[in-house]
């Protein structure tokens, strides 16, 4: 009888210890878990930290102004035939799908073609997708500096005439959390659902 009691006590202690260890493992894994982004996780990246250019109304703007919102930054140009309008249309679609939470999402379009993209043209261009989108432009030097900070590639491709050139450029969006930190690199072609997934995850984060 004593052996049976000792055995039961020992088994109870082992079971309790195992349960305790399992709980610790779950706690540890939960605290270290990362958001399930569908884009490339850039958390902790030491670039894409600043952006200071003029908007479509001639006002100087910076990323810091948008704290409290999830910000989606995209580099492109108004005469882009497919990548740029598709990206902006998807972001506008995601904003609408979020209902009231859509007000906490800020789209920022940065032109890599300031030579042709005047402030007036940029204003009408982004407004055709969403009235709340912000368009930014700078001088040639400022544009190069912004692209370097974000590690964005762009280059002019000559056309049949000097005015008909196109622009090669990085086809992706940078998504910032509400604290102003770059978190996700969302590649073109991922689709609106992937973009919505990553934006929702950042909106749900606690500050």
Image: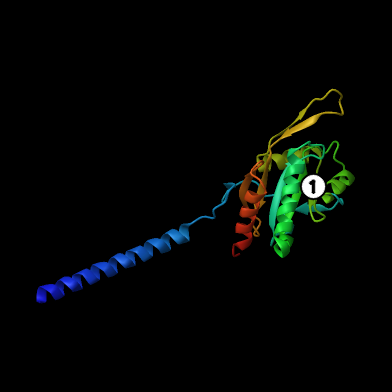
Q: Quadrant of residue 68?
A: bottom right
Specify how the rendered protein is coloured.
rainbow
Please state the total of marks drawn on the protein image.
1
**Can residue 2 be seen here?**
yes
Of the 4 image quadrants, the one containing the C terminus is bottom right
Considering every residue shown, the one lying at the far top of the view is 160
| Residue that badge 1 annotates | 136
Q: Residue at x 82, y 25 (%)?
A: 159
Expressed as whole percent of the image width and height from the top left, the position of residue 28 reads: 42, 61
Answer with left or right where residue 4 lies relative to residue 179. Answer: left
Of the 4 image quadrants, the one containing the N terminus is bottom left
Expressed as whole percent of the image width and height from the top left, the position of residue 48 reads: 65, 47
Answer with left or right where residue 123 lies relative to residue 36. Answer: right
Q: Is the residue marked by circle 1 packed among few (<14), some (14-19), or many (20+) residues within 10 Å?
A: many
**Can residue 181 be seen here?**
no
- Name above or below for residue 96 compared with residue 83: below
Answer with left or right where residue 124 lies relative to residue 24. Answer: right
Expressed as whole percent of the image width and height from the top left, the position of residue 149 reads: 67, 43
- Name above or below for residue 126 compared with residue 80: below
Name the residue nearer the viewer: 74 or 15.
Answer: 15
- Name above or below for residue 63 compared with residue 169: below
Q: Residue at x 82, y 48 (%)?
A: 126
SS assignment at label 1 = strand
Q: Residue at x 61, y 62 (%)?
A: 204
Q: Residue at x 33, y 67 (%)?
A: 20
Expressed as whole percent of the image width and height from the top left, the position of residue 133 reads: 79, 53
């Amino acid at each position: 009888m004593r052996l049976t009691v000792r055995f039961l006590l020992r088994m109870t202690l082992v079971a309790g210890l195992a349960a305790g260890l399992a709980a610790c493992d779950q706690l540890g894994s939960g605290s270290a878990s990362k958001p399930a982004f569908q884009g490339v996780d850039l958390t902790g990246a030491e670039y894409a930290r600043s952006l200071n250019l003029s908007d479509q109304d001639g006002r100087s703007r910076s990323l810091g102004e948008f704290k409290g919102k999830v910000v989606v930054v995209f580099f492109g140009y108004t005469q882009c035939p497919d990548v740029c309008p598709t990206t902006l249309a998807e972001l506008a679609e995601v904003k609408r799908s979020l209902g009231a939470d859509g007000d906490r999402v800020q789209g920022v379009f940065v032109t890599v073609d300031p030579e042709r993209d005047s402030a007036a043209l940029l204003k009408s261009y982004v407004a055709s997708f969403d009235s709340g989108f912000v368009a930014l432009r700078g001088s040639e030097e400022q544009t190069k500096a912004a692209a370097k900070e974000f590690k964005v590639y762009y280059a002019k491709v000559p056309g049949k005439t000097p005015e008909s050139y196109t622009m090669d450029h990085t086809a992706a969006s940078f998504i910032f959390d509400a604290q102003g930190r770059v978190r996700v690199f969302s590649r073109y072609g991922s689709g609106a659902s992937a973009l919505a997934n990553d934006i929702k995850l950042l909106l749900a984060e606690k500050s």
